[in-house]
């Protein structure tokens, strides 16, 4: 069996990171298929119609499961949460979800909450690994504060209930892959991480040392492609100051 994982720019794509990191950390071999974003500076939409060649919804990530390299009719799985569940069925011995029933139930619930929620944090703290943006109190509106508080509560609950160092216990599982982009957001937007509880901060620091996370960040910093609308969202607005751009090829 061959797996092809279609992703896009690593600096920006939180959804691409999730299955990529899971497969890397759990030793599931795959071919990485990078498809760069093509967004003009004046764009008002992130639609990528050219991705219809591999995804029925023109989104990433998208996983193709092929019987052979030449397979012309692969099984196609789109949406991160569906990819995780498909891989859990394909590799039951990998414990993509925690082995313990209670931990597994909690992890599934936390993943579903992340998949469906935290819209303000996604908008106000968009994925942009290579930037460092200082946020003052003015940047933290009530909805963003609520999202950060809920993230902190979730991470604290997972760490204290299941003993760490990962959210559902001693092993890296799907729930950690799902919250990895949030960990990286707290590195980009200076001032946000300080709002986390101590145990939640400890979890974030553990995740930053995960081999796959380091590999993804290194690749993101080497990218030279820029999504100008996304960059503007990261640095413009009340209470925001661009402190540093760590990306390759910066002016």
Image (cartoon, helix red, strand yellow):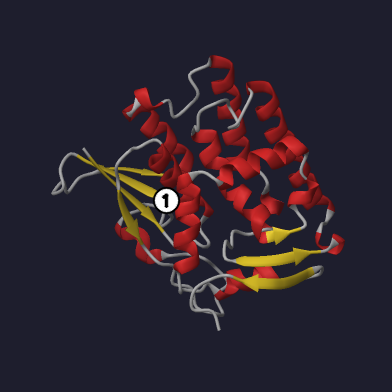
Considering depth in this image, is 204 or 35 the residue closer to the camera?
204
- Classify mark 1: helix, strand or loop: loop
Q: Is residue 29 left or right of residue 95?
A: left
Q: What is the residue that sits farthest to the bottom in this orientation?
A: 251
**Residue 67, position as x, y percentages in the image:** 18, 39
Does residue 110 sit above or below 44 in this rendering? above
Choose top left, top right, bottom left or bottom right for residue 169. Answer: top right
Q: Which residue is mark 1?
A: 61
Q: Is residue 93 visible?
A: yes
Q: Which quadrant does the N terminus fall into? A: top left
Q: Position of residue 36 (x, y in %)?
A: 40, 67
Percent across and percent down for residue 239 are 81, 68
Q: Is residue 236 visible?
A: no
Residue 155 shown left or right of residue 179 in the figure? right
Q: Which quadrant is the C terminus positioned in?
A: bottom right
- Residue at x 68%, y 35% (from the top left corner): 155
Taking the spot 57% from the left edge, 70% from the top edge, the residue there is 246
- At x 86%, y 63%, the residue is 138
* Picture residue at 71% right of the left edge, 42% below the top: 201
């Amino acid at each position: 069996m061959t797996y092809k994982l279609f992703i896009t720019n690593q600096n920006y794509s939180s959804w691409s990171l999730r299955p990529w990191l899971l497969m890397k950390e759990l030793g599931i071999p795959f071919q990485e298929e990078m498809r760069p974003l093509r967004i003009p500076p004046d764009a008002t939409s992130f639609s990528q119609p050219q991705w219809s060649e591999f995804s029925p919804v023109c989104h990433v990530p998208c996983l193709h499961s092929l019987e052979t390299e030449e397979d012309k009719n692969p099984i196609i799985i789109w949406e991160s949460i569906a990819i995780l569940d498909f891989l859990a069925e394909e590799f039951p011995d990998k414990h993509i979800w925690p082995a313990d029933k209670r931990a597994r139930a909690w992890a599934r619930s936390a993943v579903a909450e992340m998949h469906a929620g935290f819209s303000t944090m996604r908008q106000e703290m968009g994925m942009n690994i290579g930037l460092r943006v200082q946020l003052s109190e003015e940047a933290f509106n009530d909805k963003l504060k609520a999202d950060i508080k809920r993230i902190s509560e979730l991470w604290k609950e997972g760490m204290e209930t299941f003993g760490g160092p990962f959210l559902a216990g001693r092993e890296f599982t799907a729930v950690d892959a799902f919250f990895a982009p949030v960990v990286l957001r707290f590195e980009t937007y200076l001032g946000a991480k300080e709002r986390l509880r101590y145990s939640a901060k400890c979890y974030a620091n553990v995740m930053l040392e995960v081999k796959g996370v380091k590999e993804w960040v290194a690749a993101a910093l080497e990218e030279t492609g820029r999504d100008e609308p996304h960059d503007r969202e990261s640095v413009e607005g009340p209470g925001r100051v661009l402190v540093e751009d760590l990306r390759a090829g910066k002016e």
